[in-house]
Amino acid sequence: MSTFRYLMRDTFRLLFRHWGMSLLTLFSISAVFFLLGASSLLSLNARHLLDNVEGQLTVQAYLKAGTDLAAARDKVQSFGNIVQITSVTPDEALERLKARLGNRAEVVTLLGDNPLPPTLEIRVERASHVPPLARRLVAMAEVDDVVYAGGLAEKLSRLSSFVGRLSMAILVIAIVAAVMVLFNTVRMAVYSRRDEIHVMLQVGATQTYVALPFVLQGMLLGMAGAALAALTLLKGYASAVDVLASTMPFLQFLRDGALLARLGVVLVGAGISLGWIASWLAVVRFIRAAMKPL
Amino acid sequence: MSTFRYLMRDTFRLLFRHWGMSLLTLFSISAVFFLLGASSLLSLNARHLLDNVEGQLTVQAYLKAGTDLAAARDKVQSFGNIVQITSVTPDEALERLKARLGNRAEVVTLLGDNPLPPTLEIRVERASHVPPLARRLVAMAEVDDVVYAGGLAEKLSRLSSFVGRLSMAILVIAIVAAVMVLFNTVRMAVYSRRDEIHVMLQVGATQTYVALPFVLQGMLLGMAGAALAALTLLKGYASAVDVLASTMPFLQFLRDGALLARLGVVLVGAGISLGWIASWLAVVRFIRAAMKPL
Amino acid sequence: MDIRISGVTKIFEGDIVALDGVYLSVGAGEFVYLVGTTGSGKTTLLRVISREVLPTKGQVLVGEFDLRRIRYNDLAYYRRDLGIVFQDFRLLPHLTVFENVAFILEAMGVPPKEVRDRSGFILERVGMWHRRFLRPPQLSGGEQQRVAIARAIVNAPAILLADEPTGNLDPRTSDEIVQLLTSINASGTTVIMATHNQYLVDAYRHRVVEVHRGRIIRDEPQGRYMADVDL
Amino acid sequence: MDIRISGVTKIFEGDIVALDGVYLSVGAGEFVYLVGTTGSGKTTLLRVISREVLPTKGQVLVGEFDLRRIRYNDLAYYRRDLGIVFQDFRLLPHLTVFENVAFILEAMGVPPKEVRDRSGFILERVGMWHRRFLRPPQLSGGEQQRVAIARAIVNAPAILLADEPTGNLDPRTSDEIVQLLTSINASGTTVIMATHNQYLVDAYRHRVVEVHRGRIIRDEPQGRYMADVDL
Ligand SMILES: Nc1ncnc2c1ncn2[C@@H]1O[C@H](COP(=O)(O)OP(=O)(O)OP(=O)(O)O)[C@@H](O)[C@H]1O
Ligand SMILES: Nc1ncnc2c1ncn2[C@@H]1O[C@H](COP(=O)(O)OP(=O)(O)OP(=O)(O)O)[C@@H](O)[C@H]1O
Ligand SMILES: [Mg+2]
Ligand SMILES: [Mg+2]
């Protein structure tokens, strides 16, 4: 019980003795976690945007005249990654065309025999699924021609994988940076109290008693930094989305409160864990070295 | 001469004694300067983009029939912020219309008397100049109606000022962060050698002799960090522009080599100066305190 | 706890032989002066007993602990049985005199009230109570030394290792300190005191062990000591 | 350089009176023992001379320097005329013995070759040349003290302030050190040495100044000293 009191006192002494260092760490950690959160939001938003756009991703396969639509449809269905297939018979296609032409529909009668092919309209899930699907469709004997927004789909899929890789890289960099910053702060705290640690170990303090204040210091700094970052991020995100949505109304941004709250919790959790790991690494190595006899 | 050798030796000892701290500082400084450079590039690009779009920013002022075009033109000219004014007489306007209608030009003859008003086409420099200009034009007695791409211009000007303020904020934050990081590193270096500094001052070392290695340490770290950031940034920018330009060909990115080189030089210069200031602040306060008698 | 040192040799890096085949037994409750010229190995011998130094050769047994084999976790508990007055004091400059003494007890988990009482009592005893709010850099050399002694004895150790505990004290205060150590010894604590002070060795008779170039060259039981040795 | 201290009082925070109206003149080339009980104010008096401590009242003149008025830039040059053996040594633990002595000369801008020669010579003289590559924590207490003395005299100071320079030395080495200080004194350096060692004060006769509770209570010229004072 009394040990706990001593522990708390020592932890706060550590935090406040070098308060400049503590503040700096806090801000660095916040910056790193802000970056982490921002990149998560970016990639979540990119995915969200793509989902919206991709919802309308359709490949049209014009079949050879006289092909059995149902059979072709079953064949295509087996390809996988397919959300929906709509079969359009030549008659249906003609009806649609007429509807679209409105009061000039009588022109269609000039076409004589219905020249429109039976068609499959295939919806896929992801932009990246379009090009392979198109290639497989072209290879089918039944298919006469394939039409799809190839450029757009491919661009979207490239952009999506770019954002994915970017936020992955940021994730890795941010974690490494957070560990480095925390490790270094605790290491400097340990270093600046090296004589004290030596003496404490020499007069019979256990490793745990010596290490715990440093570890707690690291965890508190990690937690506070991450919490600060999460707060700033979520507040900043709300207003950024407001500004961006009004200038670029054609883009759909993510505004899912539960998801954002979960992001905040994940950030704070990561802050605590990284603080723990980093300070443990920093202090244990030092204590082991200090305990080693000459 | 020999003093210089001692100085160099001590500076490198400082850098390498706590190499973990030095490395961390290097990376933090790099990150900060990277941010700084990236935000500069962002705002330069935003400006560049806006310049491109704004090159075509035109306000059309339809004057009342019978107005003296030249007088009106002179009046508008005095408003300022105006790149170019083209006067279009009713006859010229009619000719243009005919030209645009091509082989259906004879329709114009059905209009009878020329109904087109005399017009001023006013090019401005910035999107933000459009709304005030339009307001002043509407207020003129000679003007019948004003036509401009109001929504677009206003959105552009909001976006532009948003980017401007964003990069200004980043600039300030980055400078403060760089100074803090450098200050703290040097302060910790000073702190970890506090006994040494005390003894040196007590045995007759001058303040300059004691301070210089720390100041040089700060400057070298600032310089190296900024240089690292500049290199990564300019290399990264080149490939980012390649990717972005191929996915968004409708956007014009900045690719002016001389400008980018100048940005690099500015970054490195800022690194050196901030390193100098921060470490000077860190060490001088400490030395003054150490020199103070009890 | 009795101490048995057998065949201990310590060679530091750079082929510096600090101890060279030392055999020494100290029974529980003894008082031993460790004398010898500068650099003869007194401090090293004390550090072997506190396991700050691991012998290159030889065995050290203290109570039931074999210091070669002791595990990290046991080491902390072993050291709680020791009190050490370091030759260079090693007080913590950030803490006040009072805290310097109290933190030892805190590290052992003693409750705050008892920590206050025992620390205060011991500071009274070495005559440093009136300086309890100062920090070590604000003390004179002799005052620091007395705080170091207070810290070493506050946990009522079974063995007290005092390395030159009177180096910065005037003769009168030195007398008082040795009287203090003697009374602690009388209550059962083993005391090993390294010293250069010939006067004290003469005045307060105890067993005398002389070290020279890392070897024990004399070991006189209490009362048999002759004043011609090199301190 | 001669030292004139007139009416110096030093009151530390907490109303601790360390010096209380001290008058003391030391001529150039004198050798003065400063004696007195623990906490009597010897170190404080030496720190007043080195301007580590600024008196609350009174005047200190050393050579042409008025230590109350001395400017920051002059202070460094003033201190180059001093050699100080600190009671707690204050060696730099990261530097080797050799570097600990050499860096003083380096800070004065002495060329590397001369730095090497002079440092080596002085380390020979205090008998620490064979330990030149070790760092202070690897030295015995007495060895550290000798390095501290070497550092204080390497720049051939006009005034040498030695605070308890034999506290960790055995009698024989203490003799050697005082002989060394005496020979330095013979070459013109003023020496002020605070000590608790009655034997040395008796054996090597010099002027003796006794401090008690911050006051000078005795000032005996060389040879007139009587051994009944409190050290
Ligand atoms: N860590 C170390 N590395 C190298 N040599 C060491 C180390 N510690 C001690 N020594 C050497 O071992 C010898 C004995 O040192 P020790 O400190 O035991 O002497 P001592 O008897 O305590 O002397 P003193 O009376 O001066 O304190 C010395 O010559 C010293 O230089
Ligand atoms: N910075 C300080 N703040 C407060 N009190 C101080 C400070 N420095 C010294 N003192 C007090 O002034 C008194 C005289 O100290 P000083 O160090 O001069 O004694 P001394 O004669 O050198 O003793 P010793 O022989 O033990 O070294 C002591 O009681 C000490 O506690
Ligand atoms: Mg020793
Ligand atoms: Mg003193």
Image (cartoon, coloured by chain):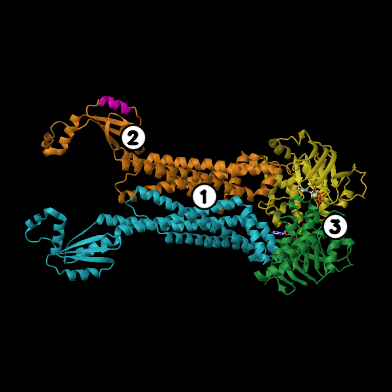
Chain colours: A cyan, B orange, C green, D yellow
Is residue D225 or residue B175 the one in the foreground? B175
Q: Amino acid at mark 1?
A: Leu
Residue denoted by label 1? B26
Q: From this view, report whether residue D212 is shown above or below residue C189.
A: above
Q: Residue C167, how many percent across, how many down?
A: 81, 55
Q: From this view, report whether residue B259 is shown above or below residue B31.
A: above
Q: Gap in Å between the C-alphas at discs 3 and 1?
A: 54 Å
Residue D62 seen in the current view: yes
Q: From this view, report whether residue B290 is shown above or below residue C77.
A: above
Residue denoted by label 3? C174
Q: Which quadrant holds residue C166?
A: bottom right
Q: Is residue A11 magenta?
A: no
What's the chain of the residue with tag 1?
Answer: B
Q: Amino acid at mark 3?
A: Ser
What's the chain of the residue with tag 3?
Answer: C
Q: Residue D74, how many percent across, how many down?
A: 70, 35
Residue denoted by label 2? B135
What's the chain of the residue with tag 2?
Answer: B
